[in-house]
Image (cartoon, rainbow, N blue to C red):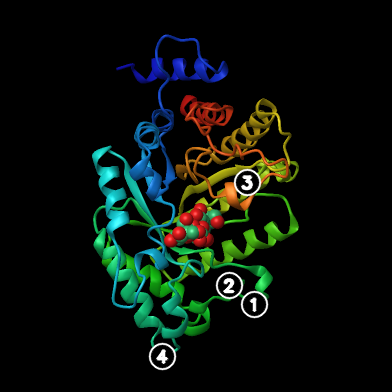
Amino acid sequence: MLDRRKFLQCAASLAAAPPCASSAPEQPLRAHAAAAGILYGAAAAYGPLQNDASYAAHFAEECGILVPENVLKWGPVHPEPERYNFEPADFLADFARKNQIQMRGHTLVWHNQLAPWVATAVTKQNARRHLESHIRAVVGHFKGRMHSWDVVNEAVSPGDLRNDGLRKTPWLEHFGPEYLDSAYHTASETDPGALLVYNDYGLDYDEPGQEAKRAAVLNLLRDLKKRSVPLHAFGMQAHLSARQQKNFRPETLRRFLGEIAGLGLKILITELDVADQSLPEDAAERDRGVAEVYESYLTAALSNQALIAVLTWGLTDKYTWLANQNKRADGTPVRVLPFDRDFQRKPAWHAMAKAFDARAAK
Ligand code: G3I
């Protein structure tokens, strides 16, 4: 084992000159993160983790924390009113345990990927019962085994034009704004040991819409804390894009995260990736552009000591939602994550390692 100082020196020199010519294989991202006092991990795709041995091996090697990309959302985990399907998430939990990887849960309350039955069965009269029993069942199943839960996801949308900034969702409509309090209280009663997170997106750039959303999110978090709701952390999704890099101001991000930490909340970067549609076709040039986004964002975010974890939304370009969502006009596959489709570390990987090492060296 290298001691910590030697490891940092080695990691810093390797990160400065990728790809490395050293005889020692470079430490995985989870080790760079650990040296900085944080966790690194990724969203896991259930099918590939079962069927693609190379993906599973790299996931186990690189990640200190895993979050299921889809299988714990309401639709997959609670497909019928009286039926839960924990099999896929149990498989991921087992994989995590065997590989000394922590696991986080995503997500209990969201307006997306709900089971179809919810639309007809949930009414004003029974919304509280449905929401609370779902949370009790899912959180209870993993009691004592989850690092953290995204209890409520994406509840803020200033564009929906409500004074409180809340998004108009089925839960808001049937239950009222107190659905948030109820969700956190129920999760806390069910698993008092889990870190309870509010998770949201669209908060990264110096753009008027994002400034309004930052203000609305801060209002929500402040109100929840004022009411002593058991909320412990904020999840910054960080779905970034090279196109918006011109609107990235480190001081804006630092100020926002500073205000969150000032509320006594921990911070997690929960879904980091970098859309590459605006970058040239040339892979090397594109990788440089994507890496620059990773590095500048993480360097700013990691200056906040309340930040405890960084997760990318996927590990390899082989499996990423952006392949469908953000297709490139030139038809080439997207290059948005730390590993390419052949599981080679990309400049984005080195940019992340470098940002982790810089925090470790402070
Ligand atoms: O499960 C069905 C499967 O049975 C069917 O064969 C297949 C055919 O298309 O579809 C499968 O469902 C898809 C699911 O991903 C699993 O692959 C859904 O159609 C598709 O909509 C779903 O997309 C997910 C999306 O959330 C849903 O809104 C993405 O994979 C997932 O990456 C994305 O993740 C979200 C976070 O949860 C919250 N933050 C934003 C982030 C990106 O949108």
Q: Earlier in the sequence, mark 2 or mark 3?
A: 2
Q: Which mark is residue 125?
A: 4
In this rendered view, identify the residue nearer to me: 57 or 233: 57
67 lies above or below 159:
above
Q: Look at the image and tell me in which quarter the N terminus lies.
A: top left
Q: Would you place residue 189 above or below residue 328 in this image?
A: below
Query: Left or right: where does residue 126 sit relative to residue 221?
Result: left
Asked if the residue under mark 2 is in contact with the one under mark 4, i.e. CB atoms within 8 Å, the reply is no
Q: List the residue tagged with mark 2.
A: 166
**At numbered mark 4, what does the secondary structure look like: helix, strand or loop?**
loop
Q: Is residue 11 above or below residue 134?
A: above
Closer to us: 170 or 252: 170
Q: CA distance from mark 2 to mark 3?
A: 23 Å
Q: Which mark is residue 240?
A: 3
Question: At numbered mark 2, what does the secondary structure look like: helix, strand or loop?
Answer: loop
Mark 1, residue position: 162
Give the residue type that dot 4 points to.
Gln
Q: Few, some or many C-alpha atoms within 10 Å of disc 4 (few <14, some 14-19, many ≥20)?
A: few
The x and y percentages for residue 102 are 32, 44
Alpha carbons under labels 1 and 4: distance apart: 23 Å
Q: Name the N-terminal-most of marks 3 and 4.
A: 4
Q: Quadrant of residue 190?
A: bottom left
